[in-house]
Image (spheres, rainbow, N blue to C red):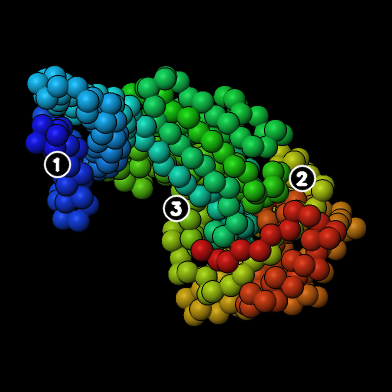
Amino acid sequence: MLRIWWSVFLIPALMLLYAALARLLPLKRIYPSPWPLSARQQRLADEMLRRMLWQFALALAALAFMIMQSLRLLPMATQQFVSYGIIVLQLLAVTAMVIPIERALRNQPDEEETMEHTKIATERAPAKVNLLLAVGEKRPDGYHDLVSVMQTVGVWDELTIRAHTDGGIALTCDNADLPADETNLCYKAAVKFFSYTGVTNDGVSIDLKKVLPMQAGLGGGSADAAAVLRGLRRLYAPELPDAELEAMAADLGSDVPFCVRGGTVSVRGRGERLETLPCLPESWFVLVKPPLACSTGRMYGLIDEGRFYDSGVEQAEAMAAALDRGDLPGVCGAMLNTFERVLPPDSEIFTIRQRLLDLGALGAMLSGSGSAVFAVFDREDTARMAVGALRGTYPETFCGKSE
């Protein structure tokens, strides 16, 4: 009987042998595709083939054994005829294994093809503080002359930018209080990038995860817009120099060029003249946002009404010298913010500032036009203790390292 049926078990045995050798030997490919496959597609095809070889071999062997037992009483000629038919069916089954593998490959496109259709860039949008902010007189163009030293702080929003082929600009945000439409600075930054560079916009989506409080003087909106510009450059124009990105940024807002560059930077004019300074000595910042809001326009209006102007030249020179020496207390000693001059004497901002100084800050001041107060610490543990002391009263309290 076996001299008739042994050939029926040959194909399942060869399938098991091939699967075992493919697992044991370091073969680069075992699925013989008639056309080139990417490395990912080849791995998928090889794994599917190995699994199907085991499954089909065992199933075919079990089926052959059951048929052999069922026909053992029939004449040998009939058994031999049936065995040939089973071999033909086995060969057809082996050939049919190609169908699910090819279907899986069609549903798993090549990595290069996937990247071509979906490009993604993730960018951080860190906060900024004004170590110095001297507001001068209003210029004929309606802007004020500024003398400022800005610093990036390691507390940030996060933006994910996806290029696709659906057309238009789509903006989403996890903060319902922030409009996700054409009025948002992120949207305007995307429009500016495509119009400035001439790159065709087949479609881009921007997902904004907000951490930085709004109306705080921490540059949240400007930082987000700058992150959009940087992300779009990565996706569409990696050769674009920083100077051109900062030129685009200047049309979006006074703080946006700095937010493109980051670090420790002297800012003059209306925010378009930047000069990178020596890095601030390692320090930790505590940012405290009280519930009150300060309208930037109103704050500038109060400065103009009282003519509370500052040149800031002396403080800027002292701060630059302290940065050159790596003298953190010297930097804090030169801090100035003209906007503090228009706050009422009983403002909660002064209460927060004094509390931060009492908690060990080397310096504390209003950031930008407010209403956030920042403090500079030379030790991380002291800064985090201050956060713990204030967060119960002011939930929007953060700690970040100088960047």
Q: Mark 1 points at which residue?
A: 14
First in sequence: mark 2 or mark 3?
Answer: 3
**Residue 239 in the image: x percent, y percent?**
27, 43
Q: Mark 3 points at which residue?
A: 261
Residue shown at the point (20%, 44%) measured from the top left: 16
Image height check: is 153 above or below 113?
A: below
Q: Which of marks 3 and 1 is in front?
A: 1
Asked which secondary structure carries label 2, the reply is loop
Q: What residue type is labelled 2?
A: Cys
Q: Give me the C-alpha separation between circle 3 and circle 1.
A: 64 Å
In the rendered image, which quarter is residue 72 located in? top left
Q: Give me the C-alpha separation between circle 2 and circle 3.
A: 26 Å
Locate the N terminus and report the quarter of the image it occupies: top left
Camera-nearest residue between 127 and 81: 81
300 with respect to 70 (left or right): right
**Residue 166 in the image: x percent, y percent?**
42, 20
- In the rendered image, is residue 109 in sight? no
Whether label 2 touches label 3, CB < 8 Å: no
Q: Which amino acid does label 1 sit on?
A: Leu
Q: Name the residue under label 2.
A: 294
Image height check: is 348 above or below 382?
A: above
Whether label 2 touches label 1, CB < 8 Å: no
